Structure formats: C-alpha cells, structure tokens
Image (cartoon, rainbow, N blue to C red):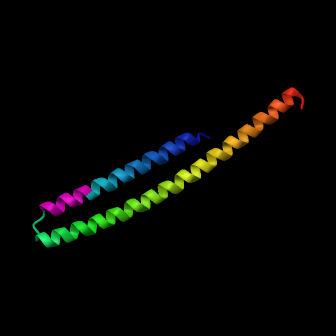
Amino acid sequence: MDHSRDDDSRRDARSFGLGLLLGAALGAGAALLLAPASGEATRRQLRRGARKLYERGEDSLHDLVEDTDRSARRFARRGLKRGRKLVADARDTVGW
C-alpha cells in the first residue's frame, strides 16, 4: 500500500478544489463589477461574496490543519514502529 500516492492524490484534489473555489470567486467578482447595478448594491454583493469566500477559506484551512496533523501522527507511529523493529532486529543479530 503506497500511502504517499494517497497523500499526493488528496493534496492534488484539495489544490484543485481550492483553485476552483478561487476561480469561482474571481469570476463572480468580475461579473459583479461588469453587471449593471448601482454602486451600493455592487459593494454589498462584493462584501457578501468576500465574507463567504473568507468563511470557506477558513473552513478549508481548518480541514487542512486536521489532515496534516492526522498524517503527521500516522507517519510518527510508522516511524516508531520501524525504529522498534530495527532495534529488535539489531538485538537479535547481536544476541542480546
């Protein structure tokens, strides 16, 4: 089982999703700027869109921190397991 491929796939999917979200937000901002609406209505829509984008970004960052923490713990456990096995193998080899 190749966990690095899984992690790369997740990272690629997350990057794609973040890019898609950013592109959608920029497109919506451009549409608002080019749409025939009053200045106040446009500013209100831009503020609302910026607030939603900020909240989504905050949620994405929180998810990323959780995923990173989970991965770091998993890699640490794997490293400890391998280290213990190496010590046990070395002891067997030396005859301890």
- Whether the magenta-drawn stretch holds residue 86 is answered as no
In which quadrant of the rendered view does residue 41 lie? bottom left
As drawn, 51 above or below 14: below
* Total numbered circles: 0
Q: Is residue 63 left or right of residue 79?
A: left
Compared with residue 37, is residue 31 higher up or lower down, i.e. above or below?
above
Q: Quadrant of residue 44?
A: bottom left
- Can you say which quadrant of the picture contains the C terminus? top right
Q: Quadrant of the N terminus?
A: top right
- Looking at this rendering, what residue extends furthest in the right direction? 95
The picture places residue 85, in percent across and down from the top left corner, at 77, 37
- The secondary structure that dominates the magenta segment is helix
Name the residue rendered at 32%, 66% in the picture. Answer: 52
Q: Is residue 63 above or below residue 7?
A: below
Span shown in magenta: 26-34
Residue drawn at 62 percent across, 50 percent down: 73
Residue at image location 67% in from the left, 43% down from the top: 78
Give the x, y percent position of residue 69.
56, 53
Question: Is residue 52 left or right of 92 when viewed as pictured?
Answer: left
Q: Image point 28% across, 53% down: which residue?
A: 23
Foreground: 3 or 26? 26
Left or right side of 7 for 77: right
x then y, percent, for residue 86 = 76, 34
Q: Position of residue 87 (x, y in %)?
A: 78, 35
Quarter of the image holding residue 54? bottom left
